[in-house]
Amino acid sequence: MFHSTNVHAGALPVLLLTLSISGAAQSSAARRAAKPDLHAGGFKPSSIMNREVTDVTLPGFHFTGARVETEPMCPVVSYEVVSDNEIRMKLRGNRDVDEASGQCGVTIRTAAGSASSWLYVELTDAEKKEQQSHQNAKDLGKYQQFLARTGKSWRVTYSNGTTETYAAMPSDPNAAGLPGFRSTSGRAIQVAVGEDNGVTIIDNQCMRGGKLVGAEVKNGQSQGNCSPPGAWTATVTR
């Protein structure tokens, strides 16, 4: 059995008005539900000092009801959503001295979504000096490992059967270039041994390459203006 409902002509304008109001309310709600937008100039200031609390203002859009989340490098002390277009926060610099980038991520989150950006955490002058000291020590350690791989002397046998022994010359870790070696005849070369044990020998306009297995290169090849050219072998003393 079917039932029908009649709509009186007088009720139609009321129904249309109700639908119009409902649609407008939904449209307004959709506008209010937009996720945060940070494209309004960024953090002011754009950097904070390490170990200090800094007042930071963030302009933007759709901030009503937002909460602020940060990475551990710049924890939030407090924040206030001043308006739909501005958040004021207090952030503490908490950067480790050996952290290279200094970029700290900040996320603004509402029920409608989230948006993220970052600001920079500046080291103090003392921390910069400490960071540089740590980096210098790390670089020196790498260079010493490099020298250890390169060895103290190389006995090279060329394709024509001649053999020459090259001894390491004093090396300066602050100088550019590969470690230098010199033979008793005065011939100078530069030698590098990579972490993969690949060997490169620079001899004026000649470059010789090979693979170090244990303490020997058995399959050396030459390219460029080499004298003598062709295959070579070598033994390294560490």
Image: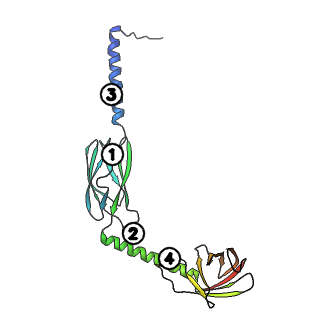
From where the camera sits, is residue 238 visible?
Answer: no
Mark 1 vs 4, N-terminal side: 1
Give the percent coordinates (x, y) of residue 199: 63, 76
- The numbered mark at residue 98 is 2
> Tag 4, which secondary structure?
loop
Give the percent coordinates (x, y) of residue 153: 60, 87
Callout in the foreground (2, 4): 4
156 is higher (above) or lower (below) than 106 = below
Q: Are marks 4 and 3 in contact (CB under 8 Å)?
A: no
| Dot 1 crowding, Cα within 10 Å, few <14, some 14–19, many 20+ | few
According to the image, label 3 marks what residue?
25
From where the camera sits, is residue 142 visible?
Answer: yes
Q: CA distance from mark 2 to mark 3?
A: 53 Å
| Dot 4 crowding, Cα within 10 Å, few <14, some 14–19, many 20+ | few
Mark 3 vs 1, N-terminal side: 3
- The numbered mark at residue 176 is 4
Callout in the foreground (1, 2): 1
Which residue is found at the position 35% from the left and 55% from the top? 70
Q: Name the amino acid type tagged 2.
A: Asp
> Tag 3, which secondary structure?
helix
Q: Name the amino acid type tagged 3.
A: Ala
- Front one among 219 and 165: 165
Which residue is found at the position 30% from the left and 68% from the top? 124
